[in-house]
Image (spheres, rainbow, N blue to C red):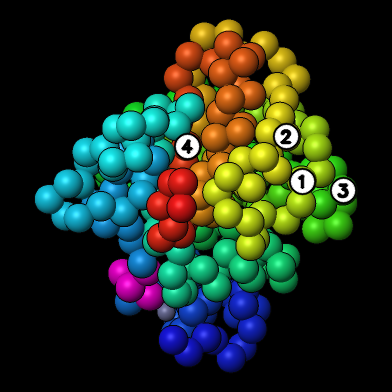
Amino acid sequence: MVYGRRGFGGASDGCLLCGQRCGGSGLCPGCLADLPYQGPACRRCATPLAPAAGGRLCGDCLIAPPPFDEAVAVFDYAEPADAMIQRLKFDGRLVYARILGEIMAIEIERRGISLPRVILPVPLHPGRLAARGFNQAIEIARPLAARFGIPLDRRACRRTRATAEQTGLDAAARRRNLRRAFSATVSLTDADVVLLDDVMTTGSTLESLALAVRRAGARRVAVWVCARAASVRGG
Ligand SMILES: [Zn+2]
Ligand SMILES: [Zn+2]
């Protein structure tokens, strides 16, 4: 993959990945088609499954389902979606949030996924938010909320503890790290919500947030992520 030499988002009509003219849509049709769209996956946790098992449940979810009802991952966390997410988060290139959010919306529509009443982006701890200047989950959620006409509630949940970086921790350590990391600031009695994040790895962050919104009364909790890393639940 050769990335555009003119700078990301710098050219008003160039594809962000290959630089070819594409009329300002962000990605040319070729790059759009080549993105690593997720194949068959567990409908409960979005972990990849063998083709014949697509739409069913993985072994982990049969034994111990997560505290959310459904999970949707649009991409595998693979090139170039991983690089797009990293440029958004670490280089502050918000144009990627717009494009990723728009592609997510198109895919969710195409797959016939049921829509929630409200989108709750995974909150960052205030310290990390101040350092980064934006929350990538909120930025990715904006085009989805706009396209579906669903409210985006940025204040219903907050991160109550600054958790250690998850990278390098095994699943049990991630869960300990995240215990009671989130709380709801409002009652969510009978709510039908989607928790939205950029990347899901073991799912422990989303499980922790799902438990918090369940404690606040949410009836249906789904998860939408831009990309799912290959790691399975509990591993
Ligand atoms: Zn292109
Ligand atoms: Zn599963």
For label 2, the residue is 181
For label 1, the residue is 163
Q: Along the horizontal axis of the image, is 106 left or right of 144? A: left
Quote the CA–CA distance across marks 4 and 1.
21 Å
Residue 165 vs 62, above or below: the answer is below
Residue 229 visible here: yes
Q: Residues within 10 Å of mark 4 (few under 14, many from 20)?
A: many
SS under mark 4: strand
Q: Position of residue 97 (x, y in %)?
A: 59, 57
Picture residue at 48% right of the left edge, 14% below the top? 219
Look at the image and tell me in which quarter the N terminus lies: bottom left
Quote the CA–CA distance across marks 1 and 2.
7 Å
**Residue 28 figure quarter:** bottom left
Please give the label number shown on residue 223.
Answer: 4
Q: Are dots 3 and 1 in contact, CB under 8 Å?
A: no
For label 3, the residue is 127
Residue 149 visible here: no
Q: Amino acid at mark 4?
A: Val
Quote the CA–CA distance across marks 3 and 1.
11 Å
SS under mark 2: loop
User: Overall secondary structure of the magenta stretch?
Assistant: helix
Sequence order check, earlier mark of 2 and 3: 3
Confirm whether the magenta stretch covers residue 28: no
The residue segment tinted magenta is 31-35
Picture residue at 28% right of the left edge, 41% below the top? 59
Sequence order check, earlier mark of 3 and 1: 3
